[in-house]
Image (cartoon, rainbow, N blue to C red):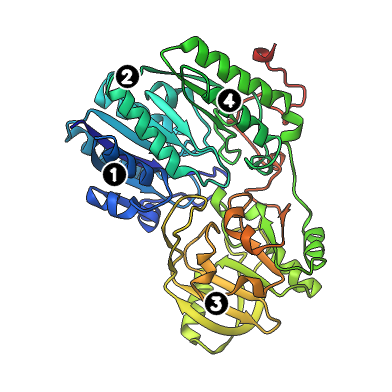
Amino acid sequence: MKRVGLASLMHESNTFFPVPTTREMFRETCLVSGPEVISHWGEAHHEIGGMLEMLPALGLETVPLVTGTAMPAGPVREEAYEGILEEILDRISSQSLDGLLLALHGAMVAQHVRDADGRTAARIRRLVGPDLPIVMTLDLHANVSPLMIESVTATTIYRTYPHLDQRERGREAARILAETVAGRIRPVQSLVKPPLCISILAQGTRQEPMAGLYRRMEDVIDQDGVVSASIAPGFAYADVEEMGPAFLVVTDGDRDLARKEALGLARRAWELRDELTLLGTPIGEAVEAAMDVDTGPVTLLDVGDNVGGGSPADGTLILQEVIRTGSGPALVVLFDPAAVQACVASGVGTEVSLRVGGKSDDLHGPPIPIRGRVRCLHDGAFVEDEPRHGGARFNNQGLTALVEMDDGHAIVLTSLRMAPMSLEQVLSLGIKPKAYRILVAKGAIAPVAAYEPVSSRMIYVDTPGITSANPAHFDYRHRPRPLYPFEPETVWEAFR
């Protein structure tokens, strides 16, 4: 039986977020090795779960190595990145392998190297030699570099945003590897990166024009000789040389076909570039619009404090407007360990006066004074069994307090930053989302899968912050130049 290693090192790094990502932050989310990889990821709607499911079905032996992932934040500390990578390399070198499945994010930045995912793939390739088949999976928000692609045999990237197809991409990667190991295919890849920045709000794969690009990609996949095709709209919150979208085609030995089809996808995106620039609704208009809806909760997506994009998770600007206008009642989740400890000290059922949120920086709103009753304290652990963005099954937002304000607002205070990918984040506290007029979700498109079933409407709110929908707000030093729409006169030679 052929033996296939499985390794992962995943992080979406926001280079504008001043808090670096530590090894402890990986441990808080997931840093496991050996048999623990199977127990943690086996049932998850994640690419690693799909790999674990498919390998034995294909007659391949799974060799779980190391998997590490952390909540998006600032660049990874050098010692954390190098330490986990060395563990992966040590485990690989201790095994006799016939192939390797490698789950990376594609937008990891370390303090000492901007193309951290490229470095990871290249270090592994140098260790195993040029002939070992390596199939890599990437997040849709990857800033794909040539080094990543040159270092592996084949690549597949998520095809949905919110990311609901992760487990299928893991299955696909396993199938490609099995065919390669058996000698039935000889994958070659072609990567094309037009000089374009796609707004986070234009990246939803169910909305046009992105939906049309993905339909075109599926037509490419259906061609004879094509093994896989992918689109990565990119991650504008990582200031790196490879920032921007990527179009990738994998064929069975036909490099010219791969290049032709990757160029075709990229050219279509370039034609649509004006439609791929979107902004959200101003805060006041969004709150007013939410109060005009009588058929159920309206979810306000706090784009500038998008936790899944590496923001602080304690932005208060929407809450401030809700309180100022007497709107609501609203349900808001804030990262505030100090406020949690104050609730613990006071006790369940007691009245508290707190200043919540707004403690990470001056960009996302000030601390807001609230008064209310501590309704519950919770350890913050919850399980999500449905396919949701990110694919994680086991989640932990740390010790958590629920404060019900005197005017009916529910404020959830967490000790660890948690992206709103799962309604279990609040259901586990006994909260009924449909009891509120306004639900605030700190994200862009990622929370839609969780919140859409309980929302009558969803509004993208143009809040300022380090995940603002308008990348013109950021001071880039390393991004490609020229890049549309930053430089509106940009001409792409490959389009001619």
Residue 219 image label: 4
Name the residue carrying label 2.
184
Please state which amino acid type lies under the numbered disc 2.
Arg
Q: Is residue 42 visible?
A: yes
- Residue 252 is tagged as none
Query: CA gap, disc 4 to disc 1?
Result: 36 Å
Of 309 and 152, the residue lying toward us:
152
Residue at (45, 11) in percent of width and height:
254
Left or right: residue 486 compared with residue 61: right
Nearer to us in this view, 435 or 441: 435
Label 1 to label 2: alpha-carbon separation: 29 Å
Where disc 3 sits, the SS reads: strand
Quarter location, residue 441: bottom right
Q: Residue 455, how many percent across, how many down?
A: 67, 62
- Looking at the image, is mark 4 or mark 1 earlier in the sequence? 1
Name the kind of residue labelled 1 in the image.
Val
- The numbered disc on residue 402 is 3
1 or 2: tag closer to the N-terminus: 1
Find numbered disc 2 in the image and state the secondary structure of the residue it sits on: loop
Q: Nearer the viewer, mark 3 or mark 2?
A: 2
Residue type (three-letter) at the residue carrying disc 4: Asp
Q: Which mark is residue 66?
A: 1
